[in-house]
Image (cartoon, rainbow, N blue to C red):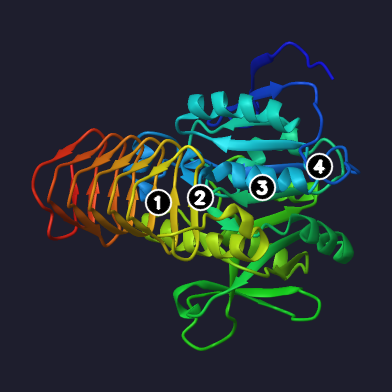
């Protein structure tokens, strides 16, 4: 099927009742091409999702000094695409991104993905931080076009996304909203959700309980009926603290427990933990995607364009990106090495993230959640312990204690 000439239109929509915040959308439109392989038939023609991109990604610096967090590659695919592709597989054909930071880069990438996936992608621009509920009010005209429910999710979340099961569960109980919850080992560190085990009906939320009331926490994935928008004003609002408790009191909010792994990957140590979980999920569901052979241990994901030298030991839990070169005798475990980087001979890396186009010298040792930003050079025979190195730096001396290299 031929597609329309690429149309890239901008229009600002201003809400008169509130002059403090202005709405702005970038609407990326192409005629839908063929569905992605493996996609189910489209039965709902107006399924929508809002992804809360927002924020400056400060927790994932120095990587987010170069690209917006949703475009940072997680297991060789931008974080955002893990979510968007799962939504498309569930039948969503309009994805709205609530954005503020580096939106031009997102626009450019989303134009490509919109055409590849055959869906509509819109960008809703926050001029001021609006919290976790305000973006829903900002995108009201895009979400409230029919009576169909819509998904909402935080952009930091990675899991085996249960969108089809969530939609069915939500329709079965017929109330205003459903949140996905996940089990944690230490509930006293979190705000927990107290709900009926059989029905999922939420009774209340308890912040950091000192006695056991629940071990289920909000997983940052929701589905709502459009009438939830009447609860939200166009101002900075917390959906967790201001909207959900009221909905629970009115018996309009239900919980569905997530099966499988879940992680908020918004900071480096959790990014690496999430990578380990994701690779284990691949082992269970798509083992053919993992790399095997002499010198590869456990779950390892390698881009086909990467080059691995002789006598290397790679794994367990390693992701190697496009165009990466790993020279002879290198040891890598529990690391992500991003596109275009080089690890020179006989270096040893554990629990690290190597940023794009960076170079790790010979006989280097890096560990303890060392993170190199884009285009960093680590010279030969150095030791980096928990270093956080900003982009375009050259490291000439060891970093024996965790610190930021400006």
> Which residue is at the front of the view, 368 or 84?
368
Q: Residue 129's x, y, as percent? A: 48, 40
SS of the residue at dot 4?
Answer: loop
Single out the mark in the foreground, 3 or 4.
4
Mark 1 burial class by Cα count in 10 Å: few <14, some 14-19, many 20+: many
SS of the residue at dot 2?
Answer: loop
Single out the mark in the foreground, 2 or 4.
2
Q: Which mark is on residue 75?
A: 2
Distance, label 4 to label 1, CA atoms, is 34 Å
Q: Which residue is mark 4?
A: 47
From the viewer's perspective, is residue 135 above or below residue 123?
A: below
Most extreme residue toward the top, as rendered?
A: 5
- Left or right: where 373 falls relative to 298: left
Q: Which residue is mark 3?
A: 232
Q: Of the two numbered discs 2 and 4 on the same chain, state the one appearing first in sequence.
A: 4
> Which residue is at the front of the view, 380 or 38?
380
Q: Are marks 2 and 1 in contact (CB under 8 Å)?
A: yes
Q: Which residue is mark 1?
A: 336
Q: Of the two numbered discs 3 and 4 on the same chain, state the one appearing first in sequence.
A: 4
Distance, label 2 to label 1, CA atoms, is 8 Å
Q: Of the two numbered discs 1 and 3 on the same chain, state the one appearing first in sequence.
A: 3
Could you tell me which quadrant the C terminus lies in?
top left
Looking at the image, can residue 219 be seen? Answer: no
């Amino acid at each position: 099927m031929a597609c329309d000439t690429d149309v890239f239109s901008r229009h600002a929509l201003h809400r008169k009742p509130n002059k403090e915040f202005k709405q702005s959308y970038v609407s990326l439109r192409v005629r839908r091409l063929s569905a992605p392989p493996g996609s189910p038939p489209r039965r709902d023609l107006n399924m929508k999702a809002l992804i809360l991109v927002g924020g400056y990604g400060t927790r994932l610096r120095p990587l987010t000094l170069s690209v917006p967090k949703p475009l940072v590659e997680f297991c060789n695919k931008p974080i955002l695409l893990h979510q968007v592709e799962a939504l498309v597989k569930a039948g969503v054909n309009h994805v709205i991104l609530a954005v503020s930071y580096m939106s031009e880069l997102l626009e450019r990438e989303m134009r490509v993905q919109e055409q590849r996936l055959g869906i509509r992608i819109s960008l809703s621009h926050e001029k001021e931080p609006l919290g976790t509920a305000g973006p829903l009010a900002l995108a009201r005209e895009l979400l409230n076009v029919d009576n169909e429910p819509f998904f909402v999710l935080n952009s930091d979340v990675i899991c085996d996304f249960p969108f089809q099961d969530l939609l069915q569960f939500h329709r079965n109980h017929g109330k205003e909203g459903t949140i996905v919850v996940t089990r944690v080992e230490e509930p006293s560190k979190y705000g927990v959700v107290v709900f009926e085990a059989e029905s999922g009906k939420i009774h209340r939320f308890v912040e950091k309980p000192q006695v056991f009331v629940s071990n289920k926490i909000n997983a940052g994935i929701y589905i709502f009926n459009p009438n939830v928008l009447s609860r939200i004003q166009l101002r900075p609002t917390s959906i967790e603290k201001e909207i959900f408790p009221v909905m629970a009191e009115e018996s309009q909010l239900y919980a569905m427990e997530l099966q499988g792994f879940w992680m908020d990957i918004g900071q480096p140590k959790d990014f690496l933990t999430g990578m380990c979980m994701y690779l284990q999920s691949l082992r269970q569901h798509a083992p053919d995607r993992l790399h095997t052979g002499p010198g590869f241990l456990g779950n390892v994901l390698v881009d086909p364009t990467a080059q691995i030298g002789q006598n290397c030991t790679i794994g367990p839990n390693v992701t190697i990106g496009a165009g990466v070169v790993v020279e002879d005798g290198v040891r890598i475990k529990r690391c992500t090495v991003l596109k275009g980087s080089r690890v020179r001979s006989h270096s040893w890396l554990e629990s690290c993230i190597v940023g794009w186009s960076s170079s790790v010298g010979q006989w280097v040792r890096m560990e303890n959640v060392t993170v190199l930003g884009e285009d960093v050079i680590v010279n030969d025979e150095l030791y980096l312990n928990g270093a956080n190195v900003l982009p375009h730096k050259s490291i000439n001396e060891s970093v024996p204690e965790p610190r930021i290299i400006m």
